[in-house]
Image: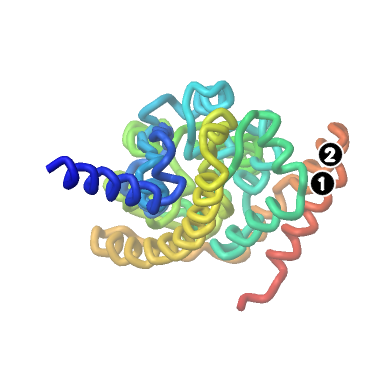
Amino acid sequence: MIVTRRVACLLGIAAALAAGPAMAQSKTMLRMNHQMAANTAGSIVDQWFADEIRARTNGAVDTKVFFSNGLGEVKETLSLLESGAIDMAALSPGYFPDQLPFFTAPNSIPMAIDNIDQAYLISKRFMAEVPAFMAEAQSKNLRPLFFHVLNPYLLVAKEQISTVDQLKGKKIRTWGSDLPRMAQAIGATPVTLGVTELYEGLLRGVVDVIPFSIDLTHNYKVYEVAKHIMEVTIWDGPTWGVWIGDKAWAKLTPDQQKIVMQVADEAAKRDLEAVRKAAADSRAFLTSQGVKIHPFPAAELAKWRATLPNYFDEFIAKQEARGKGADARKMVEIWKQVVAAPKS
């Protein structure tokens, strides 16, 4: 009996050693605040990301995702992450234009990216080729792991809109500092609302029009209170990032950090295809619910574009004053290259 127990003990030790370094570490629990509802295409990818890290580290790194701002409101999340009060966040930088200006630009400049493929590529190239991005994150004690994309934000309203003049006097949902000026340029009133506030905002008349994607209109049931979608891309680009605080990152072993980055790269690719499929599925669903999807006249779009500030020149000038002009010019150069490239 003693021999049998000794053999069993030795076998158990051998199995633990064979499982690799991840098993040798004590369990690390990470808490992620997430700004989106759990049912969106990107949120499902983020849950996969958390589950996959747990699996590949043999349970040594576990991430609990708190969807719909379960650990704090959006405007609080950056400071919570920076201080180490939370470990991770799924957070759009566009809510923090002063603290994260480089990350904010592609998350908020309107009518400057056409589709999700451009958004995906721009995000990858900015991180690889423009040093100001990582420097900005490091200044806030955090690290971006990957960024999501969103389907084009179209105009969603209770009535059909066919001209720019119809938007005059309307209350339009915006965020950051760039979209409000887009609304003001045509005589509309910008209203800052979070994603989770849009349904009630439309229902109660806090806003008349919202830029929103086809699939998010489905996910957040906005179609119940707004039955008209105008196919004009108000904004598209990289959206929320999955970020980890420096304190949480330091808890991970080098092998675990490598696994996290590998899974992050896979998650970004998975997100691109998930978002593409979500648009097709949601378009069919919305049509079945009586939503009308209307074209928006090209001449009216041109008229709207003509009212916009030169966001790129403004961004470069502002960053020049901060000593970041070279990085700002590089960012804009990459941006224009990606948007001008022919579709593959």
User: Which mark identifies residue 327?
Assistant: 1
Percent of width and height locating residue 93: 59, 38
Q: Residue at x 42, y 41 (%)?
A: 24
Percent of width and height locating residue 116: 54, 61
User: In the rendered image, which quarter is residue 112 located in?
Assistant: bottom right
Q: Is residue 232 above or below residue 134?
A: below
Q: Amino acid at mark 2?
A: Lys
Q: Does residue 80 appear to the left or right of 176 in the view shown?
A: left
What kind of element bears circle 1?
A: helix
Q: Residues within 10 Å of mark 2 (few under 14, many from 20)?
A: some
User: Which mark identifies residue 66?
Assistant: none
Nearer the observer, 320 or 112 = 320
Q: Amino acid at mark 1?
A: Asp
Count of numbered badges drawn on the protein: 2
Q: Does residue 207 appear to the left or right of 149 in the view shown?
A: left
Percent of width and height locating residue 10: 29, 46
What kind of element bears circle 2?
A: loop
Nearer the observer, 156 or 57 = 57
Is residue 300 visible in this depiction of the protein? Answer: no
Q: Quadrant of the N terminus?
A: top left
Q: Residue at x 68, y 54 (%)?
A: 305
The residue that mark 2 highlights is: 324
Percent of width and height locating residue 72: 42, 24
